[in-house]
Amino acid sequence: DQIFSDEFNVIWDSSDLDEDELVYAVLFSADNGSTFSTLEIDYNKTNITLDPSKLQDCSLCGIKILATDGINTNSSISEAFGIDTTPPNITSIIVFNESDVVDGDVLRGDNITFNVTVTDEGIGIESVWVKIWEESIGISSVIWQGFLSFVSGDLWSVEIETDESFPIGDVNYTVYANDSVGNEMNVSDNFIIIPPIVDISILYPITDISVSQNQFFNVTVNVTCVQGNCGNINATLDPIPENEMTIELTNKRTYNQKAFNIEGNKIRYQIHAGHIHYKESDEFKDIDTSLVLTDSGWEMNKASYSVEIPEFSKGNFKFVNNYEDNKGDIVSMNPIVVNNVKGVLDEDNSVVYEDAFGTGIDLKVIAKNGGLDKLIVINEKPENLTGDLEFKYEIEMNSFDVKSENGLWDKSEVVLTGDTIVLDKTGETYFREFRLWDNSGKSSKVQVRLENVGDKYYLTKILAKGFLEEAIYPVVTDDTISYYSGSGDGHVYNYGDDWDTVHDASSGSSYDYTFSTAGAMDYYFEGNYYIYRSFVPIDTSGIDDNAVIDTASLYLYGDTIYSDLYPCDLHLVQTSQSSSSSLYYDDFNQIGSTEGTPAVDIGSLYTSSYNQFDLNSTGKAWIDKSGYTKFGLRTYYDFNDIDPDDGYQEGYCWFHYKTSEESGTDNDPYLEVDIDYINKGIIPFTIGDIPFYTNETNPRETASLSAGQSEVIIYWVNATGPVESYLFFAFANLTNEMSVGDMSEEWFVDIV
């Protein structure tokens, strides 16, 4: 028996003894011929293609063909067949850990069980399977996938071992079910992986000790895997000199962080919203995006990407992604320009191709810390604007998987999108969300079209006629290609003519996280309200886990300030934006109402200078040493939910600042954190190093340890340093998850 879920053809033969012309009626039955409905009448072909989605599901379906020459009529009925367009129904997903706790935390290394109930009204379930994602659902790598086994009734089950590939924290998964004709359903959710527990204790010495210069002494530690499958554990011996110079601790650099040793036993972290370092031979170095002149144009190679910018606008723009595992993925781009003009290096480190897209429309290229920005600058309103404006780039995509919010592009159909496009090869390269803005600061998302024409791939930006007609010129649209998804600092705003509706909305009217400025604002004019809420997520995972935060301050570089309304204060709050790398409409209400610093009168803030916001105890408690700290800004009327019109006022309460999208790092938002001095650096395995060295490697690595297993490690240390008192401790952490570890008790070693 045939069962159809996709389009199928019905073909019939007919004849007439008088050779009269025949016409047909096509009828459909879902009840084995008891009743029929008409699909076609006065039909003159002997075949028809039917779409099952427009027919009723049935197990005993039939097609009747009526043929007539205008006088006589005859009919024929097909053999019975089935139609099934309904996917299976995943009615429940129960996830439980080894302790049989439903939705309980899963210790990495333990097993997790999926019990899935699936029903189907059609021909029956073919298979049920699950994918576990490294990060985001549908666009990140799959770390585990496999089929569930049928148990009984509607129940399917699988047990999965969570190994080192499973990330700590929220882990996303998708369960799929299909039937034998390809109807498919999926449901996504997440579970939580918690790390194993490690312990390190000192067996010797158990008190402070004194040693002579150049004397060896031993330190004996016991490393234990308390819970979970720890695997190999690093055990590190660290000294802390009491008197240390103020220098940068380069071993504490991350992509967005510097650390300095300051007075006493303290470290000062300067943690930027965007990247300030790149890796070269596994060493973090300062980003320098200065363009260097070459024989064919300009180049830059001191960031997590490198670029080649051609001398003329019709040349090839080459972006090489060198970030982490991307292994030098190359994306080549050619703008389809009107005029092949020579570029000029501007004082802001950009290359400008004047009139490249026609009179008054320039191409401007800027190498920024986070990626290459290709701007189209429309200096004046186009004449005879009869429709949307389109600008096209030819892009070499043949060797990449291309993904957007529409899923994986098959490279044959035309795709429209306004969100980030991901090119996936050895790693991921991003065309970040496309924006359009005018000289007043008004901005909008831009739709782009992906298409394959004659084996060439094109990305076409579509600038809406409505925006261009109302804009204050010049108008700029961006096209940023980046090695990572972004920093997510920006704003979401909402507007309307009713204060409560605008203020209490669950989502905003617009958002922007790719522009070089962002702000918090209350604005009321001629009966209309505008509320801007600002977001500043900062990756603070580089702070030592065992650090004790003493003071912390957020620094924002002022761009524009207006304070027509009174009072006009700025409030620093915590946010819960859904992504640390982007913003969306729904983030408008993902912002708190508890202050992390005393309210600041906007009139006391500065433009063209950094403004310092000192965190109180609440604000310091927000700092996440294992992830992102998410700050937000709200202005007085929004924060206190006060209608400005209640005081019969009109105007602005507005603070605008530079974001991480500003070229260079001089104006980046950054967080400065002072902590108690925890760790100067490990004792080296280099004979004669000062003030200590070991006779074996440090850190030392244990065998692979499971729950309850331990290993004793003995260090022999030579005291080569000056006469002084040194604070010692040992630290153990997982080799596969450096943030998971334990610090021993401390003791003093006096060199005498």
Image: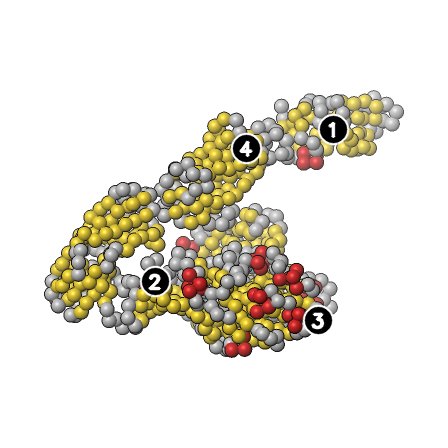
Circle 1 residue? 28
Left or right of residue 731, residue 149 in this image: right
Front residue (pair 487, 284): 487
Left or right of residue 38, residue 523 in this image: left
Mark 2 crowdedness (10 Å alpha carbons): few <14, some 14-19, many ≥20: some
Left or right of residue 326, residue 529 in this image: right
Circle 2 residue? 548
Dot 4 or dot 1, earlier in sequence:
1
In this view, the residue farthest toward the front is: 646
Circle 4 residue? 118
Front residue (pair 454, 650): 650
User: Which dot marks residue 526?
Assistant: 3
Report how far apart the C-alphas of labels 3 and 2 lie in the structure.
Answer: 51 Å
- Quarter of the image for residue 620 reads bottom left
Instruction: Confirm or deny contact between disc 1 and disc 2 (CB under 8 A).
Output: no
Dot 3 or dot 1, earlier in sequence:
1
